[in-house]
Amino acid sequence: MTFKASVLTLYPEMFPGALGLSLAGRALEGGTWSLEAIQIRDFATDRHRTVDDTPAGGGAGMVMRADVLARAIDHASPEGDLRPRLLMSPRGRPLTQARVRELAAGPGAVILCGRFEGVDQRLIEARGLEEVSIGDFILSGGEPAALVLLDAVVRLLPGVMGNAVSGEEESFENGLLEHPHYTRPQEFEGREIPEVLISGNHKKIAAWRRAQSEALTKERRPDLPGAQPLLK
């Protein structure tokens, strides 16, 4: 099954962008996943191809119109399409590795990239959009966030990563941040590779890596599950 991504955007030229390179690019070229970037303005009905209007109740900026977006979504995701409909939004639920894995296991995603002050709430409710955030900061639009989400998902598709185990030992996969990494040369500017990593004792190496992950998580991300004390 090919993972199919449909991105609704005012700037389709931003895609595939970085997704056309490296692992994601090879997978795209090989047909492991597909990407269509749909111009929202194509679904406007006036000669100016208007997609936004002033906010009800007043205020700064403009709001993306429900009627235009509804036509775009219905075109990209007709009745019977089982793909989740996502809206990249700073007020959405934070994207997690668990959600990324769920998306990677599915048929694809329809992703709406917001612009201006946001999207008419009625459209969100009427088309069942799942609002997704990639962090507590504001971007100029949803396109960079969509690229981030798709990069995270595509790398987990079967066959994209050369070594599937690589994806199992990374940050957030087990509620912990990833342990430090080292490689040659043995000595760099007076800093040596930790002795345990060149000992050949795989049990001790695993224990060292686990301890390092736990320490880093407690220091930097005490909110993660792996940093929480076990209940007795």
Image (cartoon, rainbow, N blue to C red):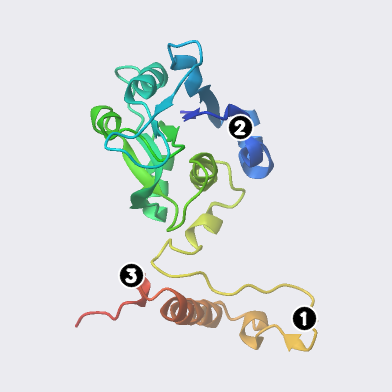
Residue 105 seen by the camera? no
| Closer to the camera in the image, 202 or 16 | 16
The crowding category of the residue bearing disc 1, from other C-alpha atoms within 10 Å (few below 14, some 14 to 19, many at least 20), is few
The vertical placement of 143 against 197, above or below, is: above
The crowding category of the residue bearing disc 2, from other C-alpha atoms within 10 Å (few below 14, some 14 to 19, many at least 20), is many
Q: Quadrant of the C terminus?
A: bottom left
Residue at horizontal 66 percent and vertical 36 percent from the top: 20
Distance Cα–Cα, label 1 vs label 3: 34 Å
x, y (%) of residue 76? 42, 20
- In the displayed structure image, the side of residue 103 where residue 79 appears, left or right: left
* Local SS, label 3: helix
Distance Cα–Cα, label 1 vs label 2: 38 Å
x, y (%) of residue 125? 24, 33
Sequence-wise first label, 1 or 3: 1
Residue at horizontal 40 percent and vertical 52 percent from the top: 95
Q: What residue does disc 3 label?
A: 225
Residue at horizontal 34 percent and vertical 21 percent from the top: 70
The vertical placement of 164 against 74, above or below, is: below
Q: Are marks 3 and 2 in contact (CB under 8 Å)?
A: no
Q: What residue does disc 1 label?
A: 186
Q: Nearer the viewer, mark 1 or mark 2?
A: 2
- In the displayed structure image, the side of residue 11 where residue 185 appears, left or right: right
x, y (%) of residue 184? 77, 74
Residue at horizontal 32 percent and vertical 27 percent from the top: 82
- Amino acid type assigned to the residue bearing label 1 in the image: Gln
The crowding category of the residue bearing disc 3, from other C-alpha atoms within 10 Å (few below 14, some 14 to 19, many at least 20), is some
- In the displayed structure image, the side of residue 163 where residue 56 appears, left or right: left
Q: What residue does disc 2 label?
A: 28
| Closer to the camera in the image, 182 or 82 | 82
Sequence-wise first label, 1 or 2: 2
